[in-house]
Image (spheres, helix red, strand yellow):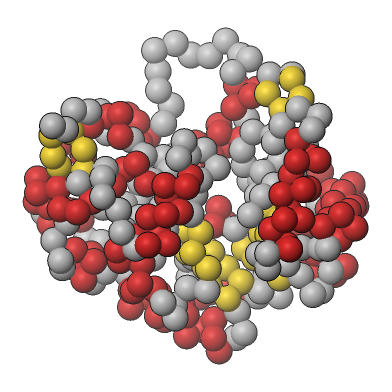
Amino acid sequence: MSGWPGQASGRNQLGYARGKRDWNAQEILEEDLRCFKKHGIKLDLLFNANCYGARAVSENLANETISIIEHLFNCCSGIDVVTTTSLAIARTVKKYFPKIEVRASVNMRIGTIQAMEYVAGLFDSYYLQRDFQRDLEYVKRIRKWCDNNGKGLCILANSGCLYCCPGQTFHDNMVAHDAEIDEMKNIKNWTPFVCWNILRKAEMHKVLLQSTWIRPEDLHNYEGLADVVKLATRLHAHPRMVLNAYSTASFRGNLLDLLEPGFSALLVPMFIDNEAFPDNWFEHTATCGHRCEACSYCKDILGQVLKDYE
């Protein structure tokens, strides 16, 4: 899954930083894509911005989308999937490239059957809103609807974001505009991110376990339920470590090191030992109903998995 150089994608532009442009970035990307395609790996083009501004429903944006896809067919033998947050881009791809699978981005937060029904004419598959994915019976309901309606279902396994975070859209937009924000004179001595603020308090560390991530060892529970498991690595320092952990269903180390964002720095000199989770961890958290206000399970388990670096 990749965005295209010069395109808004919910992250900084590829090959561009503080006015400096890597003019070889597109050439390198195209060579990588040809290599992936040669080895039978599907290509997923990402149009993932939360906002396209005045161009949101413009012919300009539609034409640009068509142009990029046509270029990818010319240089890389085409793409297989377009993942987007934009209804306009979904409509454009559906109309002009009906053989390409159109996938609803995880950033759309589609978490209910009703929401899927509303946009069934635009999307062939959906990323399930991450806040719902630990409820395995609920995922089975969604899967049944998808099967009955010829739709695909995908999940994001290693998000470090807080469960139902009220600041997520604000945070995502700041990440997308990071280059511009970096050039501004910003408010001093204030952290605008909900997660980093509350996790400075030791009594709130329990929310790290109440989040939406799935351990590599527990991913097998989604076999037959999820067609695609996405791993967030675009801002990760060690993407190969993440890929190895989930492909081998095993990880020895700090669980937070697999997540994006990870928050490892906030716990130093402590870490969350991935191997210390009890055998019934997934079974319990997949059936608890996320009634965290009336439950101490994650707080109790945190005391068990939180270890000192030796």
Q: Residue at x 16, y 33 (%)?
A: 309
Which picture quadrant has residue 177?
top right
Query: Does residue 58 appear to the left or right of 157 in the view shown?
Result: right
Point out residue 80 in the picture as x, y percentages from the top left corner: 73, 67
The residue lying at 47 percent from left, 73 percent from top is 226
Q: Position of residue 85 (x, y in %)?
A: 65, 55
User: For the view shown, which residue lies furthest in the bottom direction?
Assistant: 148
The image shows a total of numbered marks equal to: 0
Q: Position of residue 202 (x, y in %)?
A: 17, 32
Q: Residue at x 64, y 24 (%)?
A: 179
The answer to which of 278 and 41 lies nearer the viewer is: 41
Any part of residue 251 in sight:
yes
Q: Quick check: 56 left or right of 199?
A: right
Q: In the rendered image, which quarter contains the C terminus?
A: top left
- Residue 172 lies, in percent from the top left, at 53, 39
Front residue of this view, candidates 252 and 1? 252
Q: Residue at x 37, y 34 (%)?
A: 194
Residue 102 seen anywhere in this rendered image of the structure: no
Q: Quadrant of residue 66?
A: bottom right
Task: Tell me the quarter of the picture where residue 5 sits.
Answer: top right
- Is 272 rendered above or below residue 84? above
Quadrant containing the N terminus is: bottom right
Does residue 232 sit above or below 187 in this rendering?
A: below
